[in-house]
Image: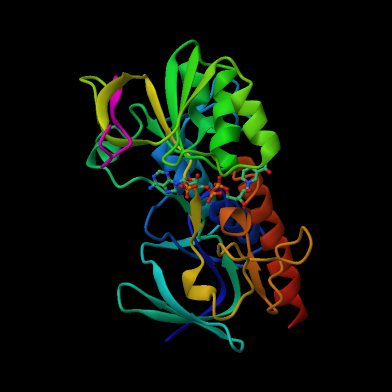
Amino acid sequence: MQHIKLLILGSGPAGYTAAIYAGRSGLTPVIYEGLQPGGQLTTTTEVENFPGFAEGIDANELMENMRQQAIRFGADIREAMAVRSDLSASPYHLWFDDGSEAICDSLIIATGASAKYLGLADEEKYRGQGVSACATCDGFFYRKKTVAVVGGGDTACEEASYLAGLAEKVYLIVRKPYLRASQIMQDRVLNNPKIEVLFEHNTIGLYGTDGVEGAHVVYRKGETDERRYDLPIDGFFLAIGHKPNSDIFRPWVQTDETGYILTEGDSPRTGIAGVFAAGDVADPHYRQAVVAAASGAKAAIEAERYLASL
Ligand code: NDP
């Protein structure tokens, strides 16, 4: 079995940045790219808020640049995804979906989080063409347009308020007759004249020839007064929660109730010597590429210090 000095799981901004820093320190890190090479950012189109790109940059190009930068400093990038871990003692043991195994002295968990989707085939069909799970990433493209946000929690209210600052009209599609969000967020939404809350509504499909042009919605599904109609919109934003990709580490590292890995203060230290968590897998709050990149840098610096102390 291969014994790796520094193993990085995940190939989003956190994983690649960790690899760039570790590579420049001469650690020759091994990165396992996981299920979605390039991470969540590859589900969007253009990135306009990553510093250094005055005109914005295509999301896939940005991630490919990070990948090449990591390779330039000696990162060994592999395609497999970790499916099991044993972090009970060093060296730490990982199993991968291609049947391989590895042990490592230090581990950076940068496996990210996945936005939850409703599970409609149309979400896949229009992904990047009007369907998004990140208002901060994609809201800008809907200036003076009409959008819908799905969800009734704090994220949905926050995203709807953010989008209302850009779009002409925002529908908030809520499946229950009430919002789950905190009172202050509810008030913000309910008092915003640009936001119309559609309580007791579910989305059953999307339509449009060249991207999203509307949603098929149902009011009071299954009730005697059920009503189905088409809601014309230009953008469809999901805000029904995220799931951190931490399941395989949960027996070992501490997480919150949703599964976000808990770290010591604002450091990437997990409490297990030599095991660090970076990016969205440990960040329920910001979920931004630039924040993930910064935490990847921190994790690499910590790993370097840890390995030097062995
Ligand atoms: P939540 O789990 O709080 O809310 C998810 C929302 O999505 C709920 O309204 C839920 O409906 C709805 N939903 C879930 N599945 C579906 C579905 N299949 N169809 C339609 N609707 C669905 O997630 P959030 O991301 O909003 O928040 C996560 C945590 O982060 C919370 O603790 C929140 O308070 C916190 N947060 C805090 C912020 C702040 O303080 N500024 C900002 C953002 C998040 P239902 O209610 O019917 O279950």
Q: Position of residue 21 (x, y in %)?
A: 65, 56
Residue at (33% x, 36% y) in the render: 220
Q: Where on the picture, by quarter, is residue 122? A: top left
The quarter of the image holding the N terminus is: bottom left
In-front residue for pair 187/302: 187
Residue at (44% x, 42% y) in the render: 176
The quarter of the image holding the C terminus is: bottom right
Q: Which residues are magenta?
A: 212-225
Is residue 212 among what the camera can see? no
Q: Where on the picture, by quarter, is residue 266? A: bottom right
Residue 20 is left or right of residue 199, and the answer is: right
Residue at (66% x, 29% y) in the render: 187
The answer to if 167 sits in the magenta stretch is no
Q: Position of residue 153 (x, y in %)?
A: 55, 43
| Rendered view: 101 above or below 40 | below
Residue located farthest toward the bottom when viewing the structure as drawn? 89
| Rendered view: 29 above or below 181 | below
Residue 28 is left or right of residue 102, and the answer is: right
